[in-house]
Image (cartoon, coloured by chain):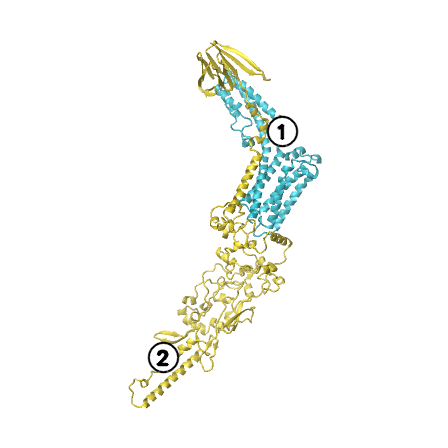
Chain colours: A yellow, B cyan
């Protein structure tokens, strides 16, 4: 038998070139080795790649060398057979060996050897591949994908989130919501709890945040003034600000909205102290724009601030105290209906001081009376509690009138009728016994004379007792008496002893629109003077040690405050903006600025820091 | 197109070949600089409480200018397809595109008030900056690279370079016939090496550490040192061809690298412009949705 080989190749023009050869052998060696029967000159073919052997008249065995494979009729294998009646194809590397079906009567096996063209070459060396585009995703595809991604993630999702959670306060308050992707910055420290709840403030789409949203929580905050008057008092704006405001008005962002001052999404910051200029803008010459205002102009505490006008009790309408704001000055008076000489009580020598020394072991007085012996601060230390007679005066000014088994009986303070009754009862209780002769069931000596005598004597004794009670009552309500010394006494109607006492009242707060904290002034150091505390600190502002009348208005004036307090920028020890004493929203309590300072642990201590807690005043200890 | 101006001018003097960068004695550079300077001055002198932000009147103003600029700058893609002469020539338009695009850095940054966060607003800003920076990169490489681009090709065209490598492959195929199976397997690695293989990073870096030809070169060089006689002769021939191919590949890949460096910015600049416009729309809508 023999193998008939036809080697088919193509010329440059595509013409087929066929070379035939004959191998007279049963075994056909295929490989790159030039000695092979079928010499395949490609490096993908091993030197000795495979061998073909006729194993029977109709079968051709194909076996690849160790580690090599061939492709027989499409399946990759190491060994295989081809039915010579049918023929088959063997692929070795890039070459194709086509075994043709053996013709009847022939013993020769015809094999066509060819190398099919592949398009791979062309593709590998396509000049378009020089461009970067060949390895990049298309620009258009990238643009579309990313654009739609951004729109979906940052526009559609948040809008969906808004409508999905609308009006459900419980749901919106917790967890992540896509509209947070829109947050332009962290909320302020105090609003940080709302970070998951955009709709707490942003209620309606495309409508600016309304004051109603703020007022939903801040129920106690009120306007600085009537909005129309507020606008009237605002000075003429500069060109840009006026334009800004008119543009704002156009979009429903009118002036005076909460968010105009209280801006949000500016980071976890705290509300900054209100600058002086913020107030001065309108208040510098407020009367020129608001002629009917009762407010005087103010721009700077140090240089432009009206004298204090405390609300003072100036007179009485019968029992009703009448308050009026008065300018502080040497002639300012108040009418409390009390008699009290501060100078006498605070004198370091004299009767009062001596009494204080004598009672020191019992009440903790010093060498002389101190302010704190009578004046008890309110629990917050800001102001003082109203003076209480029994607690604050009673240590010295005793109302005792009788002693029973070691217990002192005192007159009822605040109730003149009760006082009169108590005195009368004292004298009646100590009176003569009713003679037996006057009793109906008594066994009397015969004769009316005795009974008459007893009656006369008894009547006399009783009459003298009554006149002694009247005397005592008159004494208590007259000069030198317990009531008269401190109170305005109302004389009794003729023929009676129904004495009265004029009512007593003090304002608990003189400055209703300004804030003053006594605790912060417990230690005072005026420029160029020694540091003082206690009564001396009080006296550095209040001229009590020289006041002989209770009607003296002992409030310090502007000049006194200005010794330490200057404007926003000042050479004085305490730079003071308007906000230190006044609050924009006019709350009666502590100005927000001072509250915030306190909350943040940065309390302003006027002169000396830190102020140690004051010892409880002696008067307070007694209680 | 941006390259056209530079290549035409060759950075030479004379109005006939004035580049778009120098158009009318840097007219648009001056306009861009004035816009930036004015913006900075206003920013510094306007007292916005509590601090500068996009929601102040200045913020809105700068934001409007910025948004209009972005839309106008993006119009170049449409405009460049229609060439005209004169004041609104494509060259003038491109010049303005470059310098106003640079001024947008100032306008956009001051609009932000330097407040950044993980939100849609900063996303828009970041995309804007990416687009601008890619544009700056594009202009820079168009100014620097084309000279090296023709140098690197050694006066050859692209097809010529491919052809020379193809020829070398054929020669290697023939020369390697006597080699042992192990050696020929290595040489096949060289033949199978795709000169254009590898992704974007390979192209940009020009580094092909797993190059089949490089590997073949190393192995055959070592084999050549220890071989003798006829085998050494064959290996010597293959080695020389592999070295030639290495030089050819280096030339071709150097050229591809320069092309990639030259073209890569467009794959950032153009798609991101559209993404930027999407982010800008989301930014503007979100601001007014939650006013």
* Residue under label 2: A429
User: Relative to A86, does residue A426 appear above or below in the rendering?
Assistant: below
Location of residue A401 by image quarter: bottom left
- Mark 2 lies on a secondary structure that is helix
Q: Which percent across, then down, holds residue A29? A: 47, 14
Q: Chain of mark 2?
A: A
User: Relative to A450, does residue A31 appear above or below in the rendering?
Assistant: above
How crowded pointer 2 is (Cα within 10 Å; few <14, some 14-19, many 20+) is rated as few
Q: Chain of mark 1?
A: B
Residue A81 or residue A574, whichever sits in front = A81
Residue B264 or residue B150, whichever sits in front = B264
User: Relative to A622, does residue A235 appear above or below in the rendering?
Assistant: above
Residue A549 or residue A563, whichever sits in front = A549
In which quadrant will I find the N terminus of chain B?
Answer: top right
Q: Is residue A576 visible?
A: no
* Residue under label 1: B150
Location of residue B261 by image quarter: top right
């Amino acid at each position: 038998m023999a193998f008939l080989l036809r080697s088919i190749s193509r010329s440059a023009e595509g013409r087929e070139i066929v070379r035939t050869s004959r191998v007279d052998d049963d075994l056909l060696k295929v490989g790159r080795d030039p000695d092979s029967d079928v010499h395949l000159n490609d490096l993908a073919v091993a030197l000795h790649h495979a061998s073909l052997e006729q194993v029977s008249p109709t079968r051709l065995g194909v076996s690849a060398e160790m580690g090599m494979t061939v492709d027989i009729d499409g399946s990759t294998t190491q060994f295989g057979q081809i039915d010579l009646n049918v023929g088959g194809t063997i692929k070795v590397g890039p070459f194709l060996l086509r075994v043709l079906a053996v013709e009847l009567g022939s013993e020769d096996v015809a094999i066509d050897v060819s190398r099919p063209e592949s398009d791979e070459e062309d593709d590998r060396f396509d000049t378009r591949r020089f461009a970067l585009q060949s390895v990049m995703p298309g620009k258009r595809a990238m643009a579309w994908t990313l654009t739609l991604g951004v729109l979906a993630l940052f526009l559609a999702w948040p809008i969906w989130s808004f409508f999905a959670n609308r009006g459900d306060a419980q749901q919106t308050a917790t967890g992540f919501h896509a509209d947070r992707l829109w947050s332009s910055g962290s909320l302020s420290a105090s609003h940080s709890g709302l970070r998951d709840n955009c709709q707490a403030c942003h209620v309606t789409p495309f409508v600016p945040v309304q004051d109603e949203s703020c007022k939903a929580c801040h129920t106690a905050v009120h306007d600085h003034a009537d909005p129309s008057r507020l606008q009237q008092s605002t000075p003429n704006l500069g060109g840009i600000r006026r334009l800004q405001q008119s543009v704002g008005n156009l979009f429903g962002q009118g002036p005076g909205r909460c968010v105009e001052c209280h801006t949000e999404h500016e980071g976890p910051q705290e509300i900054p102290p209100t600058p002086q200029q913020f107030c001065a803008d309108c208040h510098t010459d407020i009367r020129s724009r608001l002629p009917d205002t009762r407010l005087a102009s103010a721009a700077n505490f140090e240089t432009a601030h009206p004298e204090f006008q405390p609300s003072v009790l100036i007179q009485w309408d019968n029992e009703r105290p009448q308050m009026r704001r008065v300018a502080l000055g040497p002639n300012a008076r108040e009418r409390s209906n009390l008699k009290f000489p501060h100078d006498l009580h605070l004198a370091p020598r004299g009767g009062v001081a001596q009494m204080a020394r004598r009672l020191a072991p019992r009440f903790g007085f010093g060498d002389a009376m101190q302010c704190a012996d009578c004046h008890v601060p309110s629990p917050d230390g800001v102001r003082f509690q109203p003076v209480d007679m029994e607690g604050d005066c009673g240590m010295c000014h005793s109302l005792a009138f009788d002693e029973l088994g070691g217990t002192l009986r005192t007159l009822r303070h605040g109730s003149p009728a009760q006082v009169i009754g108590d005195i009368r009862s004292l004298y009646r209780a100590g009176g003569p016994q009713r003679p037996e002769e006057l009793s109906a069931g008594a066994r009397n000596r015969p004769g009316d004379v005795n009974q008459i005598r007893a009656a006369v004597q008894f009547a006399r004794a009783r009459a003298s007792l009554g006149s002694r009670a009247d005397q005592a009552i008159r004494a208590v309500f007259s000069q030198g008496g317990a009531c008269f010394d401190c109170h305005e006494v109302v004389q009794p109607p003729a023929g009676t002893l129904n004495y009265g006492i004029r009512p007593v009242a003090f304002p608990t707060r003189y400055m209703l629109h300004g804030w003053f904290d006594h605790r912060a002034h417990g230690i005072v150091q005026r420029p160029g003077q020694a540091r003082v505390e206690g009564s001396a600190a009080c006296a550095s502002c209040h001229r009590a040690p020289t006041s002989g009348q209770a009607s003296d208005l002992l409030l310090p004036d502007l000049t006194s405050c200005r010794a330490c307090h200057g404007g926003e920028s000042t050479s004085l020890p305490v730079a003071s903006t308007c906000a230190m004493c006044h609050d924009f929203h006019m709350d009666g309590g502590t100005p927000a600025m001072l509250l915030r300072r306190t909350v943040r642990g940065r309390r302003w201590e006027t002169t000396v820091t830190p102020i140690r807690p004051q010892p409880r005043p002696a008067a307070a200890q007694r209680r | 197109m941006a390259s056209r101006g530079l290549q035409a001018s060759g950075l030479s003097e004379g109005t006939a070949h004035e580049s778009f960068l120098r158009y009318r004695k840097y007219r648009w550079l001056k306009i861009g600089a004035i816009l930036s300077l004015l913006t900075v001055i206003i920013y510094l002198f306007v007292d916005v409480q509590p601090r500068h932000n996009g929601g102040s009147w200045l913020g809105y103003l700068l934001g409007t200018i910025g948004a209009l600029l972005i839309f106008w700058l993006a119009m170049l893609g449409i405009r460049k397809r229609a060439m005209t002469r004169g004041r609104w020539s494509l060259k003038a338009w491109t010049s303005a595109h470059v310098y106003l695009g640079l001024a947008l850095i100032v306008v956009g940054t001051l609009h932000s008030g330097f407040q950044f966060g993980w939100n849609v607003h900063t996303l828009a800003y970041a995309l804007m900056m990416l687009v601008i920076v890619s544009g700056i990169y594009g202009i820079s490489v168009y100014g620097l690279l084309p000279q090296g681009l023709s140098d690197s090709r050694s006066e050859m065209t692209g097809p010529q370079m491919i052809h020379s490598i193809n020829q070398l492959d054929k020669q290697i195929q023939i020369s390697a016939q006597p080699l042992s199976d192990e050696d020929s397997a290595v040489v096949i690695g060289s033949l199978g090496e795709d000169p254009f293989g590898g992704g974007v990073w390979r192209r940009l870096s020009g580094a092909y550490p797993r190059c089949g030809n490089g590997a073949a070169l190393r192995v055959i060089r070592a084999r050549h040192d220890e071989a003798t006689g006829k085998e050494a002769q064959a290996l010597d021939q293959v080695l020389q061809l592999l070295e030639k191919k290495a030089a050819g590949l280096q030339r071709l890949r150097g050229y591809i690298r320069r092309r990639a460096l030259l073209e890569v910015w467009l794959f950032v600049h153009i798609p991101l412009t559209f993404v930027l416009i999407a982010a800008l729309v989301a930014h503007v809508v979100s601001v007014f949705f939650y006013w």
